[in-house]
Amino acid sequence: MSMPVPVPGRDARREFPPPAPAQPRVYTGIERAAIVLLTLGEQHGAKLWALMSDDEIQELSQAMASLGPIDPKVVDRALMDFVTRISASGAVMGNFDSTERLLRQILPKERVAAIMEELRGPAGRTIWEKLSNVQEQLLANYLKNEYPQTVAVVLSKINAEHSARILSVLPEAFALEVINRMLKMEPVQKSVLERLEETLRRDFMSSLSQTRRQDSHEMMAEIFNAFDGHTEARFMTALEDASRDSAERIKMLMFTFEDLGKLDAGACQTLLRYADKSKIAVALKGASDEMRQFFFGNMSSRAGKMMKDDM
């Protein structure tokens, strides 16, 4: 019986299975961010780049350089994913938790932990530990505008040495009232304590973090405010020639809330008539006694009482 003779080429191909289809590449979070920024281009992405730190720019740049050719479908998916995440709830909620979740998708855990610790303020696991590491004058300046009972609760929760330093820099009569409240203090309800913690975290710690990370234009605006008129004009003219955008931004920042004290009575009353009362209350809460007297002096007794209640 004759043996079958293999046909060269045809039978040889049958011995090897067809190659498996190539698996689509899985892009990391930072690679997807790089794709979005590449798509936005220079015109639309410039403002985003300006908000990033040097480390973030370096990491995104490295991801971009290693992307290679990108399928248009991948670009579409990255953009659609970005838009869908933003519009899913109809609004964007910006807080510490959402920021941390986002950063964990694109940065190493260690870097995220360091960034969030910086954002959340002084070291410490709880709000009370963090407050114990805040410079006493800063904390006293905030607490002196609160109710004595509130201050008593705060000082009872932080360490004794720090409480002593804060009491020593508070106005004496106010400090004595706080001491009396602490002596008569009863256990604070858990719900009340939780609300106080949230208020401190939102109003004090967040503003403290922003102060510590002061913008360079804000710093320069403060310096320009300290110049005499002739020096300010000389430097501002030179800056306008070198960088008109920076000069305009500094001019805007040089106008502060304290400058409103230079208004005449009629202008102040017009401001009070049209401005958001809640924003004025917040501003006056941290203003000097002179500024408060100026504003209250241009209000009716009824409007002044309502403003004080808001504060």
Image (spheres, grey):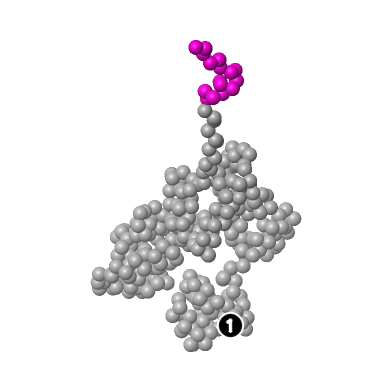
Q: What element carries label 1?
A: helix
- The front one of 185 and 26 is 26
**x and y, in percent, of residue 285 in the image:** 47, 73
Going 53% across and 33% down the picture, which residue do you hit? 20
Crowd class of label 1 (few under 14; some 14 to 19; many from 20; radius 10 Å):
few
Q: Furthest-front residue in view?
A: 1
92 is within the stretch colored magenta: no
Which quadrant would the C terminus be assigned to in this image? Answer: bottom left
Q: Can residue 55 be seen in this view?
A: no
Amino acid type, mark 1:
Arg
Which residue is at the front of the view, 193 or 75? 75
Front residue of 31/296: it is 31
At x 61%, y 47%, the residue is 73
Residues drawn in magenta:
1-16
Instruction: Give the labeled residue for mark 1.
Output: 273
Instruction: Using the image, determine if residue 278 lies above or below residue 83.
Output: below
Left/right placement of residue 226 relative to residue 282 reads right
Residue 95 left/right relative to 78: left
Q: In which quarter of the image is residue 240?
A: bottom right
- Image coordinates of residue 1 in percent, x first then y, are 49, 12
